[in-house]
Amino acid sequence: MIKKLLIAFATASLLAACSEPAPPPPPPPPPPPVKATSFMVFFDWDRYNLSAQAETTLGQAADAYKTSGSARVTATGHTDTTGTPAYNMALSLRRANTVKDSLVRKGVPASAISVIGKGETQLLVQTGDGVREPQNRRVEIVIDGAQAAVPAVFSDPKSYCKALSDKWREYRTSQVDTITAAAMAKCEAGNYAEGIPVLEKNLIDAKIPLPAPGYRWPGRPYTPA
């Protein structure tokens, strides 16, 4: 009798085990991080125009962007150590903006490109002051494969006016400009309607990127010429 009960219990247990659902399969491993792709173009001394070789390289960079589908592109300009630090900062921005303009002509959206100027602060070849080192006169283009960041949008004129003023002070610390100073004063006094257009124009004329790429107050689209 006991033997029959044990057999019945074992059979019931086996049936119960067979009826239980199988455990779910383990989740797939996360995709590997997208490796950043980088390119570099070089410039003649005290110049920011592109050579034929640089245009070819930028064509390859534009193709890499298009292959990625949607990526973030950063163009960082550099100079050698000739000239003053302030002059070199402006020159590095001109070089980076020239690269950006070329990439836009080749089909990369302007809103996907960030422009940075480093002047003579990050030398590829370490030199003393006043050295014309060709390897330091460059723009580095990085395509990191991540989703392009959405440009910042300012919700009020006060914060946007302050951002414009901060941009000018960042890149023009040694330059006295009464028109820009007056526009900053108007912003600080709350006269944004007169201060903002002047600051935007002066930044654009100086090839300094606006606080929100592709954006001008109040919410007007803008593409550098």
Image (cartoon, helix red, strand yellow):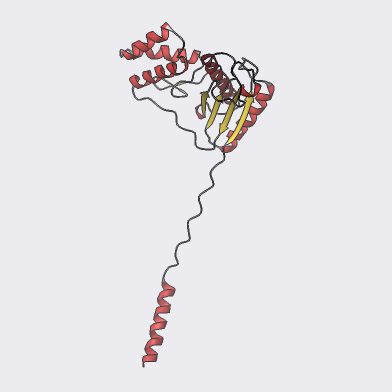
The residue at 37%/25% (across/down) is 154
Residue extending farthest to the bottom is: 1
Q: Image quadrant for the N terminus?
A: bottom left
Q: Where is residue 122 in the image (x, y as percent from the top left)?
A: 55, 25
Residue at the limit of the structure toward the front, as seen here: 128
Q: Residue at x 47, y 23 (%)?
A: 214
Q: Along the horizontal axis of the image, is 93 left or right of 178?
A: right
Q: Which residue is drawn at 39% across and 14% down?
A: 196
Residue 70 image position (x, y, % from top left): 53, 36
Look at the image and tell me in which quarter the C terminus lies.
top right
Q: Residue 50 at x, y = what percent?
A: 64, 20
Q: Is residue 132 visible?
A: yes
Farthest residue in the top direction?
178
Q: Eyeballing the image, is 146 above or below 152?
A: below
Q: Quadrant of residue 168?
A: top left
Left or right, 193 with respect to 28, comes to left
Query: In which quadrant of the rendered view does residue 105 lie?
Result: top right
Q: How many marks?
A: 0
Residue occupying the far left of the picture = 189
151 and 203: which is toward the camera: 203
Residue 58 in view of the camera: no
- In this view, the residue in front, 186 or 194, is 186
Residue 85 lies, with reference to residue 72, above or below; the image says above
Residue 155: image x %, image y %?
A: 35, 25
